[in-house]
Image: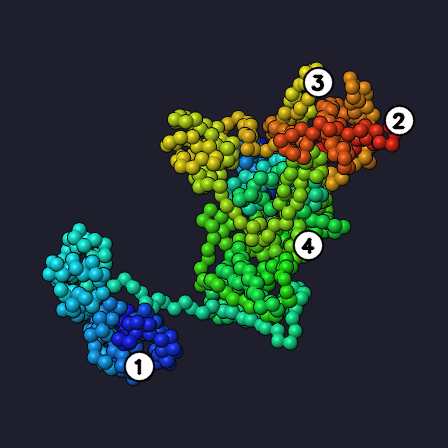
Amino acid sequence: MGTWSGMATRLAELRKILEGRFPDAVPVTYRTAAAVATGLGALDRVLPGGGLPRGRLTAWAPGGGATAMLQAACDAAVERGERAAWVDGGRVLSGEWLAGREGRAAPVLIHPEGEWGRRAALECAEELLRSGGFALVVLSGVEVVGTDGVRLSRAAREGGGAFVALSGGVPVAALRLASAFVPERFRWRRGPFGEAAELEAVVVRVKVSSMGFSSQVEFPLPVANHEYRLALDPGLADRRGADRAPAGRRS
Amino acid sequence: MRCICLWDPEWEEAGPPEALAVTLLELAPRVALGREVVWVDARGLPAAALASRLLERVAGARAGIADTPVAAEVAARTAEPGEWIRVEPGGDRAFLASVPIGLLRPDARLRAFLDGVGIGVCGDLAALEREAVEVRFGRDGVALWRLARGDDPRRLFTALPREQPHASLDFIDYVLTDPARLVFVANALLGSICDALRARGEHARRMTLSLALANGARWHRALRPARPTASRATWLRLVRAELERLTVPDAVAGVELGVDASEPAGVCQGDLFDRGFATAEAVEAAVARIIEEHGPVVVRPEVVPHPLAERRTRWVPVEPAVASATVLRDASAVLQGEVAGVSRERGSGAPVRAFGGGLRVVEGEGGAARPGDAGAVVRLGVVEGGEGDAPGEDGARLKLHLLPEPRPIVVESVPCRDHRVPVRYRDRQGWRELVTAAGPDRVSGERWGEAYAREYFRCVTAEGVLIWLFRDARKESWYLHGWWD
């Protein structure tokens, strides 16, 4: 008993010391600002505050379904009447995520171009964060290193929105996430020969860590399979095929 | 509304001359020419003195002064030449009571009815009940009954629209063929317009950009920002965007910019369901700066069902006003607040699982409370716990992402029936084992054009990454095309 009470006293003293030395450093678990819910219940339950922290930089290592979960978070923010933006520095997002939304609110998508694409992506993200009008800004395809992370973190704090960098080497981050697929829990649809034909769903393991906090969760994610079109005309199948060898090799 | 009616028997045939209006406008602020009479707006003016001065200019005319047009006209028709009759304010009905009904100019059929029942003066008709008049004389009778009571719905002079700020510049000795140079002119014009708006404490909601062409024609465009503003930079950006798209049949001889609609600057309008309310302007400005600095990088996709995945998406630039808009699909999303994916059995009162940010439906009235349903009324409580929930159909799902260009790779494959299945591949980081390869899915086409034939495989690497490979059957080479994330 004495050990426990002594430990509690030391913790209280430690907190006082930290608050005195770093008055502006509010741990994300203090819930001083409402978090941006991702819309994925299992993930929101393990995130401090029930979502991505506003006014803070969150680092999420690419891969493992991170893009899908963040796209869902952007959609959830838009559904709530807030704004979300995605800066696709790598220009790899397909159009299927935002297609067919004419007349409806959708996340803002930015595709920086040219040899200065990385710098442009960082500047666009900073501009969006400082505007204060976006609940969630995601930056993908660009490594956030060094002072870039500090600048973006400050911009997030100024604007009050949640900022997520899909990057592995972010030096300053209030929250860090890492996700990976659980390979032995892939759900395949089998073909007539018993082989794997189509991947229907995967199980994702997400690890969440912050200063003095860590957690992890597993949950399933369905897979949107690519629809193969066989003809330009949507109503017809193109059965013309093509020569396997160039025409010049024919006898 | 105090008005003066001028009447001359000579105007019965051809009406008052139009030149008369120019003469009378020297004395009165607003003049309207009727079919047989002339109306003058006497609001706020000494009507009697004004009527005397008007009669001095129009020899032989008579004038009537009243609150309603019908009383003023009857007074003018009953006055002597060169004289005016004034009806006391509020006394129109009493004045009309003794006036013969014929002065109201009823049609012959109705006049016969009225004579038949002994109605000779307006007072007799005005004393009847409306229902009785309608039953006996119909709709025309009711209209005449109103006039006999001094109830004239005509509004001859409505409130003057306030002149909006505008500016123009005409090129006298030369014409412009490069629309980009017009931006400089527009910038100068906008300066005076925006200064005028700020001086009045107003924001412009809409402006019109007009170009006078050398062939005498005019080109117009309406400009609308996302939010009313008096910002010169915002309006210049809109003008520049229009001028860059400009295609006119002839050179430009003049430029005009004018405000069509404005509102007080203190009014802050926004969408009720916009959680970023009052930040829309800041967002639009931020997006506009991004576009100005980096070009048309704010885009939306246009997807076509092309067989080749890399040709399916075309990126279309988005305007800042569109990018800053937030529109909820329906009000039920507001009712549900933070809940996303709440479902409830129809008619059930039991609590249900929540997919969203921590709220659960504990009671409800009416039908199912699914996202997107309108009219569902639910009361929300705090989630008390729950197991891991699966994202629903509208939740996250892994999507295919493509490399900008398919990347050539080296693949080791094994035979399987009529095709070869990849078992490992080498990229810049070295060899990677594939634990599963689903396929092939064959795509081919454009035999008479740029022919293609591909065999796609959906593979899982030993690290658990889902990738998309294809074998080009024409070139006998392998490529990495994308991955799922």
Indicate left or right for B159 with B122 as reference: right
Q: Which residue is mark 2?
A: A251
Residue at disc 1, secondary structure: loop
- Residue drawn where x is 87% and y is 28% of the image: A250
Amino acid at dot 4: His
Indicate left or right for B112 with B385 as reference: left
Question: Are labels 3 and 4 assigned to the same chain?
Answer: no
Alpha carbons under labels 1 and 3: distance apart: 103 Å
Q: Position of residue B214 (x, y in %)?
A: 61, 69
Q: Chain for mark 4? A: B
- Labels 1 and 3 touching (C-beta < 8 A): no
The crowd level at tag 1 (other Cα within 10 Å; few <14, some 14-19, many 20+) is: some
- Labels 2 and 4 touching (C-beta < 8 A): no
Q: Position of residue A89 (x, y in %)?
A: 70, 45
From where the camera sits, is residue B74 visible? yes
The crowd level at tag 2 (other Cα within 10 Å; few <14, some 14-19, many 20+) is: few
Q: Chain for mark 2? A: A
Q: Which residue is mark 4?
A: B294
Alpha carbons under labels 2 and 4: distance apart: 54 Å
The crowd level at tag 3 (other Cα within 10 Å; few <14, some 14-19, many 20+) is: some
The mark found on residue B58 in the picture is 1
Alpha carbons under labels 1 and 2: distance apart: 106 Å
Question: Are labels 1 and 4 assigned to the same chain?
Answer: yes
Q: Nearer the viewer, residue B438 or B252?
A: B252
Question: Are labels 1 and 2 assigned to the same chain?
Answer: no
In the picture shown, does residue B417 fall above or below B375? Answer: above
Alpha carbons under labels 2 and 3: distance apart: 38 Å
Which of the two labelled residues, at mark 2 and mark 3, occupies the earlier sequence position? 3
Amino acid at dot 3: Glu
The mark found on residue A195 in the picture is 3
Q: Select label 2 or label 3 by which is in front.
A: 2
